[in-house]
Amino acid sequence: MMNAVTEHTTHDDSGTGGSTDKRTLRRATIARRKQVPADERARAGEQLAQAAAAITNGLTPGATVAAYVSMGSEIPTAPLLRWLLDAGYRVIVPKLGRGLDVGWGALTSLDELHAVTLDGNAAASSGPAHVDSTAHVGDPAHVGSTAAVPADRTSAPYRSSLQRPSSRRPQEPTDAATLGMDALRDAALIILPALLVDRTGTRLGRGGGWYDRALEHRRPDARTVAVCWPWEISDAPLPREPHDVPVDAILTPDGMVATNGTATTAERGGRSTD
């Protein structure tokens, strides 16, 4: 296992997307992820699934698990999602409208996942999306960005751009009903992506705030588990704000690592760094 991150500043975040220190950490982490060979990434996804029993230990049979669909340089979550479904859990994953709306969709089979367009509709091709993006739900460069589309949102080119498959959002269960943000209250376990996590459970996401808004609706006793590579566990404290809530555990291809966060029950009903 490669060494954990050990050196960086602890300057507090300020402003959308985070401070300079957070942006530097994000860029460095994403750059390293891109160097992981495809076969190693695929193997890591299988290893996540093999470790799933550790994070579901104690859950009621049929309990709701909120998870996510990986994309780009992230560790593939398809094997983990398949394991959860085969184990009989109810699985919900992010299902967005046009923009960064917080919503969820129930997933009953991986065959239900399809690429989506920027306006949130199913893409014409039903095959798996070919993505090599570093963006994920909540990334500032996500669907809310206008950088890649014409300024005139009434123009034909802009409307056409919204209807093309997007490499900047994960696949979704397009035929499933879109559940509201409060659907997260049903989840006994929440599995979420992370770029870095420190030993106290402070999580660094991609900076767009999607999970900040989503986790406001979690129930206080929900177990939260962040997924990352082993070398993305930081021995040094990550930038943290007063409203940030530590995750309970970290899941890597090497297994589960419990954090030593000291948040109270009330604090754990709040928000997590994104």
Image (cartoon, rainbow, N blue to C red):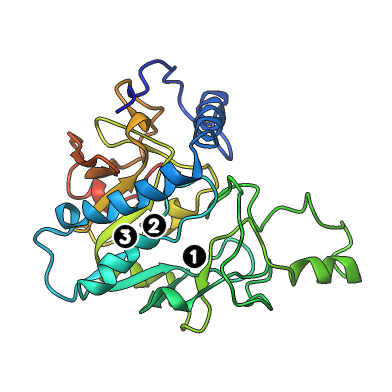
- Say the numbered circle drawn on residue 138: none
Distance from disc 2 to disc 3, alpha carbons, whole Å, reads 5 Å
Residue picked out by circle 1: 102
- Given residues 99 and 117, the one toward you in this image is 117
Question: Residue 203 placed where, x, y %?
Answer: 36, 38
Three-letter code, disc 3 = Leu
Classed neighbour count for the residue bearing mark 2: other residues with Cα under 10 Å, few (<14), some (14–19), many (≥20):
many
- Say the numbered circle drawn on residue 77: 2
Three-letter code, disc 2 = Thr
Q: In the image, what residue occupies the spot 42% across and 59% down?
A: 214
Seen from this angle, which residue lies furthest left? 58
Question: Residue 18 placed where, x, y %?
Answer: 54, 34
Q: Nearest to the eye among marks 1 and 2: give it.
A: 2
Three-letter code, disc 1 = Val
Q: Are marks 2 and 3 in contact (CB under 8 Å)?
A: yes
Quarter placement of the N terminus: top left
Q: Nearest to the eye among marks 1 and 3: give it.
A: 3
Q: In the image, what residue occupies the spot 36% across and 51% down?
A: 45
- Given residues 4 and 237, the one toward you in this image is 4
Q: In the image, what residue occupies the spot 39% across and 62% down?
A: 78
Question: Residue 136 placed where, x, y %?
Answer: 54, 52
- Say the numbered circle drawn on residue 80: 3
Q: Decide which of tag 1 and tag 2 comes sooner along the chain.
A: 2
Compared with residue 18, is residue 237 higher up or lower down, i.e. above or below?
above
